Amino acid sequence: MSYLLRSWQGAVALLLCLLALTQLPLLGPEAPLPVGSGATSVILLLIAGGALASFLPIPSAALAAILFVAAHGAAWLLIGSVDGNEGHAGSAFFLLVAASWLLGWRCITVLADIEPNGRAAETVLRLLIPAIFGAWILILWEAGTRGAGVPFILLPPPSAIGERIGNSLPILAADVRQTIFKAVLFGYVVGCAAGFAVAILADRVTFLRRGVLPIANLMSALPIIGVAPIMVMWFGFDWQSKAAVVIVMTFFPMLVNTIAGLGAAGAMERDLMRSYASDYWQTLVKLRLPAAMPFVFNALKINSTLALIGAIVAEFFGTPIVGMGFRISTEIGRMNVDMVWAEIAVAAVIGSVFYGVVALAERATTFWHPSNRGG
């Protein structure tokens, strides 16, 4: 009984499949390109087969493979049926999309319950599960916008955004080079390094610590839309002004987190260092900085997203005719929404990779920390 309860997605998917049979065809009578009965039959068989398989005593890996093929095969055929028929999808179409999504959900659940055998299998599962989850966000987005005929100007489907990315690679590469490899990286390195150095200095000088922290909390609350135009006036329209905005945005999170981390070492450990006649710098290097590393990496991860946001928003207030923020602001004025979404998608991917690199560095550096020893 517990297995049947855990397989409720299959039961609901089968119910939706039966309900869709009463609502056929997939498209309305006014659709310019009718869908053949063969394609509809394959979709129904895939969903019904996947739903029934979820109740059988099949090994988890095999069941996950069956559900994966059934869910994604049906979704691919359903999206193909509305290609050229945007806005003409009937209720059967949306019922079958929902049934396919439930099979995809069940596939993820089965994969999450698998006990990996070895490091390689664990890595594959940790990558596969979020990949399937993310793919279904795109599938539902594509099916919803095409099936319901959402106006392109409001929300283009992912396929249109992907096509725009493929056709605009030189433009996107130039924008990434201007925004990421110039403004973001330079500002991130300088801002984080300056915040870390000032935190060490403030930790050493009590007077400075008591004066810097309140000001840091105040400055961290400054709105970027107020700082960005001032930096453009001070440093010009090129990437230097955007790097200055990134420095301002990344300096204070690093400062506050590092100061907090330097105070994380326990009193017993400090007493032990004093009993060894360690001076300030020896205690700092051998005890307090290692204890502060989780706080420092927390600031680095926060700043990895803040830097990207700061540089893009700063480009709204003045930039040469290149850059991700410049492209977003100009293309939205021309109603080229797919290009705007292409820039957003590229920024999201770069930001995720940036964050992931910092997270991997944290895992390699602070492997001894309890937050990393379990996973």
Image (cartoon, grey):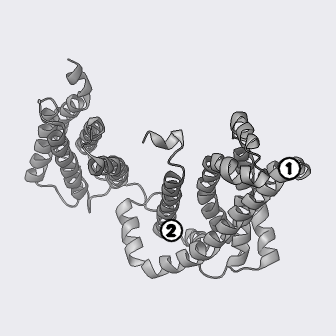
Q: Residue furthest front?
A: 276
Circle 2 residues within 10 Å: few <14, some 14–19, many ≥20:
many
What percent of the width, then of the height, locates residue 21?
A: 15, 37
Residue 255 figure quarter? bottom right
* Along the line of sight, the residue nearer the viewer: 187 or 122: 122
Circle 1 residues within 10 Å: few <14, some 14–19, many ≥20:
some
* Along the line of sight, the residue nearer the viewer: 181 or 173: 181
* Along the line of sight, the residue nearer the viewer: 136 or 265: 265
Is residue 27 something that shows in the picture? no
Q: Residue furthest top?
A: 1
Q: Circle 1 is placed at which residue position?
A: 209
Q: Is residue 250 above or below residue 275?
A: below
For the point 38% across and 60% down, the residue is: 158
Q: Circle 2 is placed at which residue position?
A: 343
Q: Amino acid at mark 1?
A: Arg
Q: Is residue 45 above or below residue 364?
A: above
Viewport quadrant of the C terminus: top left
Q: Amino acid at mark 2?
A: Glu
What percent of the width, then of the height, locates residue 293?
A: 62, 50
* Along the line of sight, the residue nearer the viewer: 137 or 330: 137
What percent of the width, then of the height, locates residue 265?
A: 69, 40
